[in-house]
Amino acid sequence: MAVHVLIDGYNFIRRSASLRVQDELALELGRDALLERLRQYRRNRGHRITVVFDAASKPLLAEEHSQQKGIKIIYSRQGETADSVIKRICHKEGRKLLVVTSDRELASFAERFGSVAMDSVDFEAKMEMALYLDSEGVEAENEEKGWSPKKGTRKKGSAKRLSKKERKRREKQRKL
């Protein structure tokens, strides 16, 4: 099952070293570079991706929705931040989302509604690794399989099962 990835657009761009350079040249270049990388990632992984941007440069009376390169793009309306749009989506969709932001307050809000939050830098690293493995023709290994015990070894001590919240977080991150 594909994950719905909800990205805080300008937060992601300004936390990424390569995208920040494009953004400093022109705001549109940064957005276009992000959308191109997300398009490649979406083609590779098949996840539903939504990017939310502040519409500060073009004051909109209503929220603007568009589709570009298979990525849903939302611009906040005049007087509203991208964070408030993301909060509204989290409130509505909750458990279905993986929210990508480096904003701790926004990440905390998303997790209260059952979404999984991931730092922008961490998501970018996962995205780059997925694109690299795809370009090399290598299948990503299932992270859950990892180490397997050899004959004669056995776990000692009590089992330390992760919390339900942490298991859910890892499951969504594994799908990236």
Image: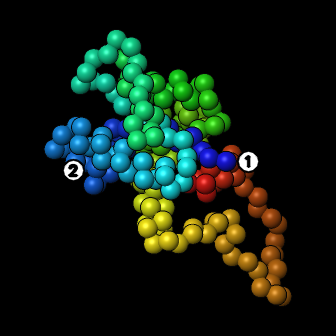
Mark seen at residue 16: none
Task: Determine the residue positioned at 16% across, 44% down.
Answer: 25
Q: Is residue 58 left or right of residue 99?
A: left
Read off the residue under disc 1: 164
Q: Secondary structure at mark 2?
A: helix
Mark seen at residue 21: 2
Identify the image quadrant of residue 103: top left
Task: Determine the residue positioned at 46% across, 24% down.
Answer: 85
Q: CA distance from mark 2 to mark 1?
A: 39 Å
The relative height of residue 39 versus residue 79 in the rendered view (above or below) is: below
The relative height of residue 9 versus residue 17 in the rendered view (above or below) is: above
Where residue 18 sits: x, y (%)?
27, 55
The relative height of residue 110 versus residue 59 in the rendered view (above or below) is: below
Residue lying furthest bottom: 152
Task: Determine the residue positioned at 39% across, 36% down.
Answer: 68
Where residue 83 sits: x, y (%)?
43, 28
Identify the image quadrant of residue 98: top right
Give the mark toward the camera: 2 or 1.
2
Q: Secondary structure at mark 1?
A: helix
Amino acid residing under circle 1: Lys
Identify the image quadrant of residue 148: bottom right
Q: Is residue 100 left or right of residue 91?
A: left
Q: How many marks?
A: 2
Amino acid residing under circle 2: Val
Task: Determine the residue positioned at 57% across, 67% down.
Answer: 140
